[in-house]
Amino acid sequence: MVGARLSERGVLRDPLAARDASDEEIERVHARHYLELVERETREIGRARYLSTGDAVIDAGSWRAARRAAGGAIVAAAAAVSSGEAVFALVRPPGHHAESDRGMGFCLFNNVAVAARAHQAAHGGRVLVVDFDYHHGNGTEAVAGSGLSYCSTHANPAYPGTGLRSFRRGADVVLNVPLPAAGISTEAFVATWETLLPAAAAAVRPNLILVSAGFDYVAGDSVGDLGVDVTAAAPIASAVRRVAHEFCGGAVAYVLEGGYGLDALTESIVAIAGAQSGAVPAAAADAASLPQDVRGQLDEALRTAQGSS
């Protein structure tokens, strides 16, 4: 339905065909026995139920859908690299909670991580994953390293209860800025990203940026809701665009994660598309005006990015 709405708005241009991710591509992130488990349990299923590894609901179509979502992320990343432009992978199920041998939180395969490792297999280099979903991407954090860095804002306390500190993993960084689950102003949310993202990119100097684009932070979302206005997507996308052009020739692929309101999803993606025109909305707020607890978390992330934490 979101795709149809984007077509009506004239945003869905030059669509790319997704494909299934191969076993080899998925196994760069996930254990072989886990792939076999997902295939077996979805094949044997009679009705929708939970995957045996945890809180991910599956049905008979889940295996095919998850392979296609991971493959769609790979296609988007490759297209972004070849074109030097932003590409959006409108895929489901989401992926950022999926760990190497465990599906959870609606996620079976970690789409952005699979795409990152596919890019590295083809081109080498470094990948920065940017995650503004309401929930922390515990699966992506778990596989960070070997040229894959991760930065995230997410509600705390909230599912899955991870992402409480920032740290370095060799030459790579994991930067976490927990936000109060009770909510944050739109201006503060945007200011956090306008400060965090350039610091993360400067530390990593990525060849590709992948965005775990979860829009459940938007006010009114049935699963998340940080009280942030839908308009936040535009200045954040502009910040992503600036960093992508500075470090990786404009190569950025957005991969859909959470977000469960059709209106908010549509408007957010429309805003991201508009930001690619080069119009740069002014910063909504100075980072110095952030709430004290958020400022402290952001400062820790910045120190980690600079190698002083």
Image (cartoon, grey):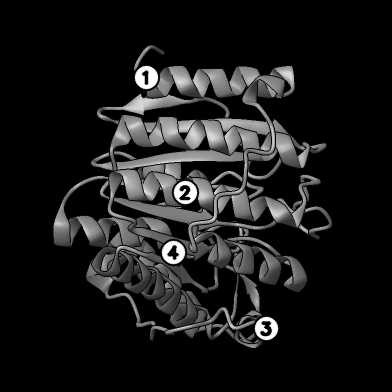
Mark identifier at residue 273: none
CA–CA distance between discs 4 and 3? 27 Å
Q: Up-down: is 149 above or below 32?
A: above
Q: Residue 247 location in percent, x, y? A: 30, 44
Q: Are marks 2 and 4 in contact (CB under 8 Å)?
A: no
Position of 87 with respect to 5 (left or right) is left
Q: Which residue is mark 3?
A: 5
Q: Residue 209 location in percent, x, y? A: 37, 51
Instruction: Please identify, in this view, whether the residue under mark 1 or under mark 4 is nearer the observer.
Output: 1
Mark 1 surroundings: few (<14), some (14-19) or many (≥20) residues within 10 A: some
Kind of residue at disc 1: Gln
Secondary structure, mark 3, is helix
Sooner in the amino-acid sequence: mark 1 or mark 4: 4
Sooner in the amino-acid sequence: mark 3 or mark 1: 3
Q: Is residue 156 visible?
A: no
Q: Which residue is mark 1?
A: 306
Q: Which residue is mark 2?
A: 240
Kind of residue at disc 4: Phe
Q: Tell me what residue is drawn at x 67 percent, y 45 percent.
A: 159
Q: Which residue is mark 4?
A: 109
Secondary structure, mark 4, is loop
Q: Up-down: is 6 above or below 269?
A: below
Residue in front for this viewpoint, 60 or 155: 155
